Image: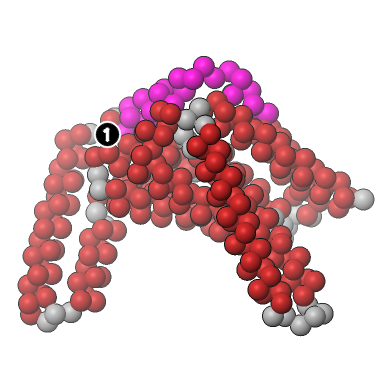
Amino acid sequence: MDTVGTFFASSSSSAAAVSAAVADAVVTSLPETLAPAADAALTTASDSLVASILMIFVSEIGDKTFLIAAILAMSNPRSTIFLASCSALWLMSVLSAFLGHAVVTFVPMSWVSLAAAVMFLVFGVRLLQEAKDMDGSEIAKEMDEVEAELGEKDAARGQAMLEAGEAAYAVNVGEQERGARDDGSSTLRSLRNLCSLLLSPVFVETFVLVFLAEWGDRSQLATIALGAAKNVYGVALGTILGHTCCTAVAVLGGQLLASRISVKKVTFAGGVLFIIFALTYGYEAYAALD
């Protein structure tokens, strides 16, 4: 848990340092009359970025999408699993952040902040209750459930699809080699390689599994709430960075990490963080109504 805490702290401090450096560089290049407004906007964006990264870390470590990527990476090319998982999560992050932002155009900001406060309070209390009830075997149970869900698929059919994909890839490689001897077009070869990756059964299956697992998940709903109450671009970028880091950890050594971290402590930290978000948005709602 010390390692995970150090990782969270270093990630958030690095993100804050980068955001502050960019803000200073941009503000100093603006006219004096515009500098205060730009400074406030960039500060809001940086706060949104850090809050989103922290929210993803405490929500996704040991979550179903994390374990799906970890398990699939054990028997498939890691680069394919990483790209497919990240593509699904990036798409979900952008859609969720801008969905929340769109709500603001129809609902007063004070009501949006109040709704976000209530949602984060409910999530926070539930996380604290879950942490209290945990006995330390949750990761193993979740891992078994994910493996069972993946194993429910027809193994013979999946193997046939993989073999078909590998055969098509082999044919495509042969065509690329012949094309290289014929015309030497490196751009065409690169496009063919990209299409072979994106249309491979492994990539498509991983993308669909992760996207559906994330749909309606707590982190998606939290992203919508943050997108509605904070800077939408900072939220979108923060969730993308957070998901990318978590997916990289899952693909490179997710099962090892999941077996060593204390999910109870991570869940407790997530509950505390969500309650802090609830208090912040509750204060903003109160100030807007005043």
Taking depth in this image into account, of 253 and 115 the one nearest to the observer is: 253
Horizontal and vertical percent for residue 16?
63, 56
The residue labelled by disc 1 is 153
- Taking the image as shown, residue 2 lies to the left or right of residue 103, namely left
Horizontal and vertical percent for residue 84?
35, 52
Horizontal and vertical percent for residue 136?
49, 20
| Quadrant position of residue 109 | bottom right
- Taking the image as shown, residue 244 lies to the left or right of residue 157, namely right
Q: Is residue 131 above or below residue 150?
A: above
Q: Is residue 101 magenta?
A: no
Q: Is residue 180 above or below residue 156?
A: below
Give the prevailing secondary structure in the magenta stretch: helix
Q: Which residues are magenta?
A: 125-150
Residue 232 showing in the rendered view: no
- Taking the image as shown, residue 155 lies to the left or right of residue 20, namely left
Q: Residue at x 26, y 64 (%)?
A: 195
Q: Residue at x 57, y 28 (%)?
A: 265
Taking depth in this image into account, of 283 and 107 the one nearest to the observer is: 283
